[in-house]
Structures are given as C-alpha cells and as structure tokens.
C-alpha cells in the first residue's frame, strides 16, 4: 500500500518503459488516490514525458507521467529507456518472449471512431506505421482521414484502406483515389471482408486490385481473413497471391490461404480478442479502448522499405 506524500518535483524526460506487472495508469496525479484511467498489462510499453515525486509505494516515490496526463508508479516497470527527443528515434521494438509479437506493434489501423491523443507519443513508444480507413464503397468516406494524415505523416508511415462493397467497382476506385490522394509513400489496401447485404464479390476484388495497379503502377495490399479463405477455398490463385496479404486472424497461429506462403502483415487483435499487446500510448481506440494491432515480421527499417512498394 502507498503512503500519500503529495506531488512534488517533476523532471522532464523522453523515453519509454515496459510494465513488469499489471499496473494502474492514474489520471491527474501521481497518487494511489487518483482515479484509474486504465490498467496496463505486464509487457505493455508506455511513452514517458517526465518522472514525478508522488505517493510513496513500497519505499519508492517515483512515478512516470505520460502526455494524457496520466501517472504510473515507476516501481512497476523495467528500467527506463531513453529516446532522442530531437529525432524521436527509439530502440527497435522488443519481442515478447514466446509469442513472436512486439511489446508495441509496429503497425495499427484506425478509423474515425478511434480516438487519438498523440501520434508523436505513439511513435516514441515504438509504433512506425498507421493505416487509416479512407472510403467505403462508391460514396462513403471517413471524414477524419485527411486531418489525421497531415499530422501523422510527420510521425511515421501512412496508409489508406478502402472497404469494398457491391457498388460498381470503377466508381469505388474513383471514390477511393479522389479522397485518399495516395502519394508514392502511401500504402494502399483493399479491405475485403464480410458485409452482409452489400458484399464485394471475388471478381469485384480482382477488378479493384487491377484498376489500382493500372492507375498507381503498383499493387495494393489485400486485407482479408475468412472472406478470402472461403472465396478461394483450396485454390491457388496466382493473381491474388501476387498481392501482399494483410491477414486478419485473432489467434496465436495465423494461417494463410493456399495462394500465399505467408502473410505480409497480420492483424492479430481487435483490441479484445487475440494475443499480444492491445494498446499503444497516444492512441485511445474506440469507446471501449479497443485498438486494431498488427504484427510485421521484420525490423522497422524493413517495414519502411516495403511499405508502399
């Protein structure tokens, strides 16, 4: 139990630390009496902006402050890792033993319903790529896409997704490109998943990917899970297999359809189901604090080299 000492000296720092046990992230003050903003599981890494003298817990009165502002007792974390505050550079993300997943995912994907506090904080914690929903079908658009793009591109890699529907494919491609405005560094992806009553067909997905390749002179990534597995069955389809697969599968053992030897990106959790880290400092997620997190089986440099190719 902690002994209340009141908040005192605050020392600005820039870095990150990883929780070694489940720890409360408290709102407003470095005190065990402050309300709990959320719980951090062991293995979760947070970006730190300052160390604060607060309530004494087990003989240690040091607390870490994030940008929320929120506070976590420093005794619950591994040794602090400094980050170069001018370049924003950090060490390569640490691999969680036995899972193959990083303590902080290299990539997340979001839409307008996900709250964002600080892209720079997310970058400092280890995030390197952010993929945002841009359009749905022939008319729908995500109004947060452009605002967030202009901010987030200064803090990492940027990507745009299109949710495919039963609408005419040419109209969907036009809709997507006009709103997403992908430059040569923007990852583009087709979201091919179940949409009852408005489902994009397999031939529609093929046409969409073909048109994107024609217009951008590069292939889009295909995001899918059970939908592509069901549509193709056991068939080996060279066309789809020539596109990088962003696999959606919330489990410990990702399995790809026969057209691919492996995934390029693996969405391993929706922030609730699935293994591994489910939170990134600076990104709030949806109303239940759920966040889509993705695993890339390589380094941050590898990701940057392959991102928009």
Image: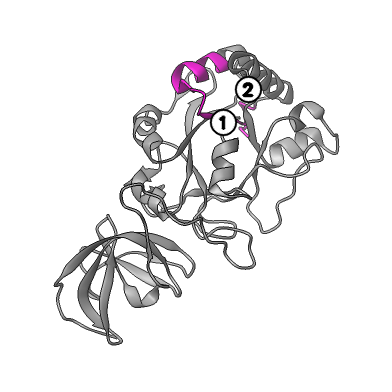
Compared to 20, does 271 lie above or below?
above
User: For the point 21% across and 63% down, which residue is it?
Assistant: 28
Residue 122: percent from left, percent from top: 39, 50
Position of residue 79 in the picture relative to residue 69 (left or right): right
Residue receiving disc 1: 308
Residue 109 counted in the magenta span: no
Structural crowding at the residue carrying mark 1, measured as other residues with C-alpha within 10 Å and reported as few (<14), some (14–19) or many (≥20): many
75 vs 269, left or right, is left
Q: State how many labels appear.
A: 2
Q: Which residue is mark 2?
A: 218
Tell me the magenta residue range.
172-199
In what element is the residue under mark 1?
loop
Residue 145 position within the rendered picture, expressed as x and y whole percent measured from the top left: 40, 30
* Tag 2 secondary structure: loop
Say which quarter of the image contains residue 34.
bottom left
Question: In this rendering, does residue 103 appear at all?
Answer: yes
Q: Earlier in the sequence, mark 2 or mark 1?
A: 2
Residue 115 falls left or right of residue 65: right
Which mark is on residue 124? none
Query: What residue is at 42 percent from the left and 28 percent from the top?
Result: 142
117 on left or right of 91? left
In the image, 38 versus 118, the foreground residue is: 118
Instruction: Answer above or below: position of 212 versus 246.
Output: above
| 2 and 1 marks in contact (CB < 8 Å) | yes
């Amino acid at each position: 139990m902690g002994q209340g000492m009141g908040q005192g000296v605050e020392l600005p720092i820039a870095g990150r630390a990883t929780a070694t046990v489940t720890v409360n992230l408290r709102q407003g003050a470095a005190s065990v009496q402050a309300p709990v903003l959320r719980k951090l599981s062991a293995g979760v890494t947070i970006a730190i902006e300052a160390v604060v003298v607060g309530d004494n817990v087990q003989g240690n009165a040091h607390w870490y402050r994030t940008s929320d502002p929120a506070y976590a007792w420093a005794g619950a974390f591994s040794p602090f890792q400094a980050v170069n505050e001018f370049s924003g550079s950090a060490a390569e993300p640490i691999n969680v033993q036995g899972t193959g997943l990083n303590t902080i995912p290299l990539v997340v994907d979001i839409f307008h319903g996900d709250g964002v506090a600080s892209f720079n904080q997310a970058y400092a914690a280890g995030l390197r790529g952010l993929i945002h929903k841009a359009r749905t079908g022939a008319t729908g658009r995500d109004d947060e896409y452009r605002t967030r793009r202009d901010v987030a591109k200064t803090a990492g890699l940027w990507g745009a997704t299109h949710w495919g529907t039963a609408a005419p494919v040419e109209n969907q491609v036009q809709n997507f490109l006009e709103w997403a405005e992908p430059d040569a560094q923007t990852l583009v992806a087709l979201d091919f998943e179940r949409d009852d009553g408005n489902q994009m067909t397999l031939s529609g997905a093929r046409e969409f990917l073909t048109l994107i390749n024609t217009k951008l002179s590069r292939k889009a990534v295909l995001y899918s899970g059970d939908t592509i597995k069901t549509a193709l069955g056991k068939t080996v389809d060279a066309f789809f297999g020539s596109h990088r697969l962003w696999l959606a599968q919330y489990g410990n053992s990702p399995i790809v359809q026969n057209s691919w030897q492996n995934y390029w990106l693996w969405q391993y959790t929706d922030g609730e189901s699935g293994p591994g880290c489910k939170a990134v400092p600076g990104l709030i997620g949806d109303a239940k604090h759920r966040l889509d997190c993705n695993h890339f089986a390589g380094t941050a440099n590898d990701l940057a080299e392959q991102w928009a190719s």
